[in-house]
Image (cartoon, grey):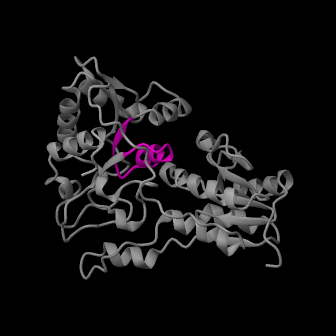
Amino acid sequence: MSAAPAHILALRFSALGDVAMTVPVLKRLLEQNPALEITLVSVPFHQPLFENIERLHFYGADIRNDFKGITGLIRLARTLKKDIRFDAVADLHDVLRTKIIRNFLGRVPVAVMDKGRKEKKELTRPGNKKLRPLKTTFQRYADVFTKLGMRVDIGRQRSETRDQASDLSTPKSIGVAPFAKHAAKMYPLNKMEQVVQQLAQDDRNTVFLLGSRAEAPVLEQWAAGHPNIQVVAGHYTFAAELGLIAGMDVMLTMDSANMHLASLYGVPVVSVWGGTHPWLGFYGWGQDPENAIQTDLPCRPSSVFGNKPCPVHGEAGCMQEITPEMITVKIRNILNGNSN
């Protein structure tokens, strides 16, 4: 390429956690390339993630309705060509829909994300696993822009969460997001309820329960009779929920989107891992690896996305040895300014 691009069209439609992981990379890319502009194409729901980032333009494309199917994607590509003066394309998704779109964007340089499927398979296969930390998804995103001739150094990610005050007498806001897309990534709900009740025993804590509208009834049952447990699920817009997460003192999540959302605001996250593993490259931006609670089982990890049950322990079996007390102790240590 003779010259670095001036305006990159970036594509990433799903999932929420993966889209959130683009944010710190795009911020550093723009900081290190002050003449660059980026237009990110994603579903409209994700727009609040990208507000107030200088030279980053969000293009909301409703691919389930307005641009549905192959003909809709072709029409989207033509609309993008008409509306935006870009001179390079970064495919941060590399799925069928982005392949269709990029093939109709004209004769511009295109760089595509390498998802590392081979090494992820080596890490998750039932036997003869090649256990080692893989390249992070953040670095994989950055590599796409490097292919386009851009300078992007995402630097070290550890210790980027904000420091916590050691005074436990002050009120604390604790976010708890107990759900995940797949059962193999979810701590058993009966045990998670115990965690919530233990955290709520200290009435100086306010425990906020996050989830989808469909998950709210379970959370309402947990909160019943506890004035310091508040259900967020189903009551806030996405933008308002992000604002609430930003004010948390600590978050408890699964390997899920909420881990990444909290990480964007420097909130320390205690994450619970079962069938998946931080070594697969999806750990939260800037999070301390010591705050990942997991068991050292030879079957782990059993899948990349948690969509396959463990062949040895079933769906949530890889989490059965994790006690509620292990989780609450970790959270209290963080609130006390002690990461150990």
Q: Say which of 35 and 338 sits in front.
A: 338
**Extreme residue in the front direction:** 166
* The magenta segment: 249-268
Q: Say which of 82 and 256 sits in front.
A: 256
Q: Residue at x 24, y 47 (%)?
A: 187
Q: Residue 160 location, x and y as percent?
A: 46, 52
Quarter assignment of residue 141: bottom right
Specify whether residue 239 is painted magenta. no
| Residue 95 visible | no
Q: Residue 236 location, x and y as percent?
A: 49, 26
| Residue 173 visible | yes
Q: Residue at x 53, y 67 (%)?
A: 139
Quarter assignment of residue 98: bottom right
Q: Say which of 190 and 96 sits in front.
A: 190
On the rendered structure, is 79 left or right of 117? right
Marks counted in the figure total: 0
Q: Residue 36 location, x and y as percent?
A: 77, 59
On the rendered structure, is 275 left or right of 317? right
**Extreme residue in the bottom direction:** 128
On the rendered structure, is 241 left or right of 98? left
- In the displayed structure, would residue 144 be above or below residue 83? below
Q: Residue at x 65, y 58 (%)?
A: 11
Quadrant position of the N terminus in the picture: bottom right
Specify whether residue 256 is painted magenta. yes
- In the displayed structure, would residue 6 be above or below residue 178? below
Q: Residue at x 40, y 54 (%)?
A: 287
Q: Say which of 19 and 283 sits in front.
A: 283
Q: Residue 260 location, x and y as percent?
A: 45, 49
